[in-house]
Image (cartoon, rainbow, N blue to C red):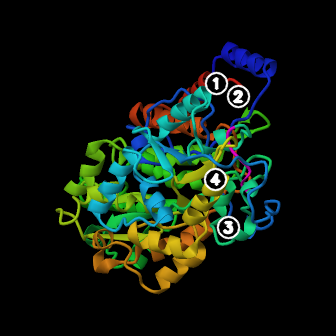
């Protein structure tokens, strides 16, 4: 590491007043495919960060009670003509608006009609702003809206950068002011609540979805190369990272290097990162512990034996690797089953459609998610409250949403009841799995196990992006040492974030 560069970074850090804008992020790819095009893509906003969550054991004890009156506080604005809702695209919000307003949304034609009506401001009492950009670009648009003073009541924040707004009282409202407290969200998954909390422990955001992840794999190839005939058999083969590496080496050897067990370094990191037990930054200093080197070693081993695909996550070739059979498995979150993962099978009726199965994989993990927040300057307090209740608290509404969208909703009771009833959430998605495997049942325990309590820092998204980029470019592609990789990582962090130091 260049000593002068470190010294200058330290001087800069000590000379400035630090404002910790935290947000929630995942790996260098964003939590949704539209946010990034490659695993090594760069962003300029050093305030983007990762957040994480807590499990059931810490759900009650780690946060102060969020009491509420059940009524909108008198200080909250009322009487606006329309509830203005903003998001980066129209993938999710129209469903939630339809649910709230009682509009039919059960078919593709109905969906297209509603989107068209929203674009033309024909939905009574609603103005929907869809930026038509990737999730990672939304923050720029929100910042411009706030700067211009335009009408904005409710907006959606992605996990990568949610805390940038949640930790800013001028941008997000304490939900107790809308009469919403613990009683309204008693069945949400603990980690989602942590992401929606500000650094001072105030609930500012709430999600309608729980984005637990698992390892989806070609069942026929698993039986051919590993002798795994069931998801339980496969779980034994990949139950931890040592076993995962061994299984990948076995698949590679048996296929003469033509089949990779894992889809990409980005996917691998998404799961692996959720096992971290110490935060990236402690007392303003970057923490590079044994976990970092362990991942680098794992990644390099898999890279060299072609146990992990060399494709860039989100590239078209990343998806077609599954279609051609060159990639045997994907790390997938709940929102991905009807998206990129279905594409990787060739869609409904495609060449690899119906050949997949799901197991938990080496570690419980989550990937992404979206949080609903409210502008403190809203002039539609009652409408904002009703919209949030419909999306995140009304169990009947959430039940229908889970089945219709489909979605793994952020309510343990709703999901447990649906899973117990062997609900088919979506025939097209379910049909991609052998014997119509109940994939949501496989992820129910994962969602309850996720535990990131105490790991949130204001810098995580950018730090993690720099880390995986260094591992890929220096160690895996460049063949350099861990020390060289570490130096590249430190240099990039100091370049992108001026208010932390490196020892």
Residue 494 has which mark? 1
- Mark 4 and mark 1: Cα distance apart in space: 23 Å
| Circle 3 Cα neighbour tier, 10 Å, few/some/many (<14 / 14–19 / ≥20) | some
**Residue occupying the point 37% across, 44% down:** 120
**Which structural element holds mark 2?**
loop
Quadrant hosting residue 203: bottom right
Nearer-N-terminus badge (2/3):
3
Residue under pointer 3 = 185
Query: x, y (%) of residue 467?
Result: 55, 37
**Residue occupying the point 39% across, 74% down:** 425
Residue under pointer 2 = 502
Nearer-N-terminus badge (4/1):
4
Task: Judge depth for marks 2 and 3 and give the one in front.
Answer: 3
- Mark 4 and mark 3: Cα distance apart in space: 18 Å
Nearer-N-terminus badge (4/3):
4
- Mark 2 and mark 4: Cα distance apart in space: 23 Å
Nearer-N-terminus badge (2/4):
4
Q: Mark 2 near mark 1, Cβ–Cβ under 8 Å?
A: yes
Query: x, y (%) of residue 191?
Result: 64, 60
**Which structural element holds mark 1?**
helix
| Circle 4 Cα neighbour tier, 10 Å, few/some/many (<14 / 14–19 / ≥20) | many
Task: Judge depth for marks 1 and 3 and give the one in front.
Answer: 3
Residue 91 has which mark? none
Q: Which residues are magenta?
A: 171-175
Examine the structure image and report whether residue 412 is included in the region drawn in magenta: no
Residue under pointer 4 = 52
Nearer-N-terminus badge (2/1):
1
Q: Mark 4 near mark 1, Cβ–Cβ under 8 Å?
A: no
């Amino acid at each position: 590491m260049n000593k002068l560069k470190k010294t200058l970074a330290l001087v800069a850090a000590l000379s400035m007043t630090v404002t910790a804008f935290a947000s929630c992020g995942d790996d260098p790819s964003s939590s949704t495919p539209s946010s990034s095009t490659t695993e090594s893509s760069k962003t300029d906003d050093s305030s983007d960060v990762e957040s994480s969550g807590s499990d059931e054991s810490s759900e009650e004890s780690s946060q102060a009670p969020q009491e509420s009156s059940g009524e909108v506080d008198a200080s909250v604005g009322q009487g606006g003509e329309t509830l203005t809702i903003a998001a980066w695209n129209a993938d999710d919000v129209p469903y939630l608006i339809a649910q709230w307003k009682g509009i039919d949304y059960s078919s593709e034609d109905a969906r297209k009609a509603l989107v068209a009506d929203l674009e033309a401001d024909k939905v009574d009492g609603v103005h929907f702003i869809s930026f038509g950009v990737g999730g990672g670009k939304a923050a720029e648009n929100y910042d411009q809206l706030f700067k211009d003073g335009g009408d904005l009541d409710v907006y959606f924040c992605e996990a990568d950068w949610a805390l940038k707004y949640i930790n800013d009282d001028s941008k997000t409202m304490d939900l107790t002011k809308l009469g919403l407290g613990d009683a309204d969200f008693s069945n949400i998954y603990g980690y989602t609540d942590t992401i929606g909390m500000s650094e001072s422990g105030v609930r500012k955001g709430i999600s309608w979805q729980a984005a637990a992840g698992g390892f989806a794999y070609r069942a026929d190839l698993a039986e051919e190369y590993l002798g795994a005939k069931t998801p339980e058999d496969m779980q034994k083969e990949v139950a931890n990272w040592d076993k995962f590496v061994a299984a990948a080496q076995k698949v590679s050897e048996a296929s003469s290097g033509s089949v990779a067990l894992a889809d990409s370094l980005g996917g691998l990191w998404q799961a692996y990162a959720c096992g971290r037990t110490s935060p990236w930054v402690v007392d303003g200093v970057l923490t590079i512990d044994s976990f970092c080197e362990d991942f680098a070693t794992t990644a390099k081993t898999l890279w060299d034996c072609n146990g992990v695909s060399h494709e860039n996550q989100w590239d078209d070739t990343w998806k077609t690797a599954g279609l051609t059979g060159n990639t045997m498995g994907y790390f997938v979150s709940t929102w991905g089953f009807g998206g990129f993962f279905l594409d990787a099978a060739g869609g409904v009726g495609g060449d690899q459609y119906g050949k997949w199965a799901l197991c938990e994989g080496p570690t419980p993990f989550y990937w992404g998610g979206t949080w609903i927040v409210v502008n403190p300057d809203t002039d539609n307090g009652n409408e904002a409250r009703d919209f949030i209740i419909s999306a995140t608290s009304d169990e009947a509404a959430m039940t229908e949403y889970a089945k219709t969208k489909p979605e793994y909703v952020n309510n343990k009771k709703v999901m447990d009841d649906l899973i117990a009833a062997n609900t088919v959430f979506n025939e097209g998605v379910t049909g991609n799995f052998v014997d119509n495997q109940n994939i949501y049942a496989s992820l129910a325990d994962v969602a309850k196990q996720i535990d990131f309590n105490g790991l949130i820092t204001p810098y995580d998204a950018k730090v993690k992006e720099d880390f995986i980029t260094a591992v890929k470019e220096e160690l895996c592609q460049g063949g350099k040492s861990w020390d060289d990789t570490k130096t590249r990582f430190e240099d990039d962090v100091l370049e992108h974030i001026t208010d932390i130091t490196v020892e």
